[in-house]
Amino acid sequence: MTGKRRISAWLAIAALGGCAAAPPAPAPVAVAPAPAVAPKPEALPVTPVPVPAIMIVQSPAQPPSPSPAQPPVALPQVNEDEQQALALLADLQRYAVDPGEDLKRELVAANTALARTRSDANRIRVAMLLTLPLAGPPDDARALSLLEPVVGKSGNSSPLKQIAVVLYAQILERSRSVREEQRRTAAAQEKLDALRAVERSLLLERSRNAGGGSAGGGGGTGR
């Protein structure tokens, strides 16, 4: 009885094992194929190519083409008035550096030329020399009188007139400065003379007072 039961139990277990569904087999996983590696090309031998030498060839210098002849430039015409003005300016610059003996001779020669020809240039030359102390005692009054006819000319200003105007203004200004200085000197001298007069008056008064006191003392002694 016991052996039959064991056989029955085994049969039941086997039946149950047959009834149980076997688990499904796992689906195959698709594996991506490995990328194909292209074979590296073999390096080809490089043969150096010779570079030809470069030569620079300069063309011979070409002679300059002759330029067309230029017409001569016409120089401005210089009239006689301008020539005299240029000569006068050169003389004035020379007077500024000449020694006294030369200036005295120049003044004599300029006065002689002015007596012969009373031109504007001669007037200006003498007037300039009269203002230079090394040429002699300055004479501004005569210099101004010589320049006035040139300065007072009407019409367009010529080069000589322009020089005369500048020189006339300088002499006039200097004359005013000299007169002003003389006026101040005279006023100072008047004040000094007045002070000296007051001093003399005080000394005289003191002397009188001293003399009177001595006389009075002598009289008392006699009595």
Image (spheres, helix red, strand yellow):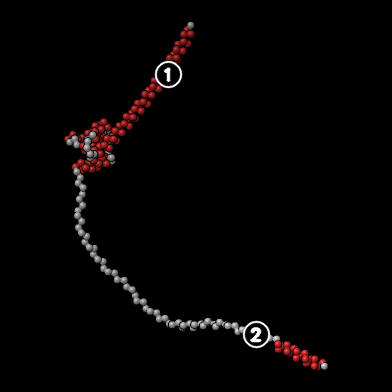
Residue type beneath disc 1: Leu
Is the residue marked by circle 1 packed among few (<14), some (14-19), or many (20+) residues within 10 Å? Answer: few
- Where 45 sits versus 77, above or below? below
- Residue positioned 46% across, 83% down in the render: 42
Q: Position of residue 8 (x, y in %)?
A: 77, 91
State left or right for residue 67 relative to residue 173.
left
Q: Position of residue 17 (x, y in %)?
A: 72, 88
Relative depth, front residue between 41 and 185: 41
Quarter where residue 132 is shown = top left
- Where 165 sits versus 43, above or below? above
Q: Please, what secondary structure does the residue beneath circle 1 have?
A: helix
- Residue positioned 20% across, 59% down in the render: 68
Relative depth, front residue between 121 and 131: 121
- Residue positioned 45% across, 82% down in the render: 43
- Lower position in the chain sequence, tag 1 or tag 2: 2
Residue 24's tag is: 2
Residue 106's tag is: none
Q: In which quadrant of the rendered image does the N terminus lie?
A: bottom right
Quarter where residue 10 is shown = bottom right
Relative depth, front residue between 211 and 196: 196
Q: Is residue 125 visible?
A: no
Q: Position of residue 146 (x, y in %)?
A: 23, 33
Per the model, the C-alpha gap separating discs 1 and 2 is 161 Å
Residue type beneath disc 2: Pro
Q: Is residue 57 visible?
A: yes
- Where 89 sits versus 51, above or below? above
- Residue positioned 34% across, 75% down in the render: 53
Viewer-nearest of labels 1 and 2? 2
Quarter where residue 180 is shown = top left
Q: Please, what secondary structure does the residue beneath circle 2 have?
A: loop
Residue 202's tag is: 1
